[in-house]
Amino acid sequence: MSDKIGFHEVTHSLKSKSLDLISIVREGLPTRRKHVESIRSRFSHVRIIVPSYAKSAATMMAMSADEILLERDAELGPIDHK
């Protein structure tokens, strides 16, 4: 829950219609879906920057962006941890 509250607090006051988001989360939590819904409802263009890797829910969050920037050795996936 603190993740959701902190995310809202940081993005709430932004006035721009574009958002650059650096993904430094490794896997992510189910709450990432709520983050995506919030971001997509408020910003017309979203770019996610992945400096190392994004797995699971963090990959799904990256895939919701209009643009993804990956460092040379960065990676996405998988989205199923079973």
Image: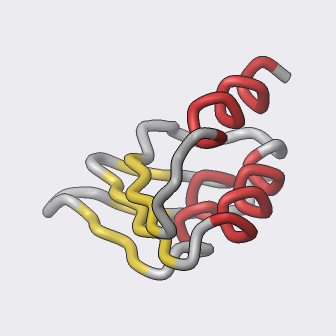
Vertical relation: 28 (above or below) 46: above
Q: Residue at x 56, y 78 (%)?
A: 44
Colouring mode (rainbow / by chain / secondary structure / one colour): secondary structure
Q: Residue at x 49, y 76 (%)?
A: 45
Q: Is residue 54 left or right of residue 20?
A: right
Q: Residue at x 76, y 57 (%)?
A: 38
Image location (x, y in percent) of residue 28? 66, 41
Outermost front residue? 15
- How many labels sit on residues? 0
Q: The N terminus is located in which quarter?
A: top right
Vertical relation: 58 (above or below) 69: above
Q: Residue at x 55, y 52 (%)?
A: 55
Image location (x, y in percent) of residue 60? 65, 65
Outermost left residue? 72
Res 2 → quadrant? top right
Res 8 → quadrant? top right
Vertical relation: 24 (above or below) 59: above
Image location (x, y in percent) of residue 47? 41, 68
Which residue occupies the foreground of this view, 15 or 20? 15
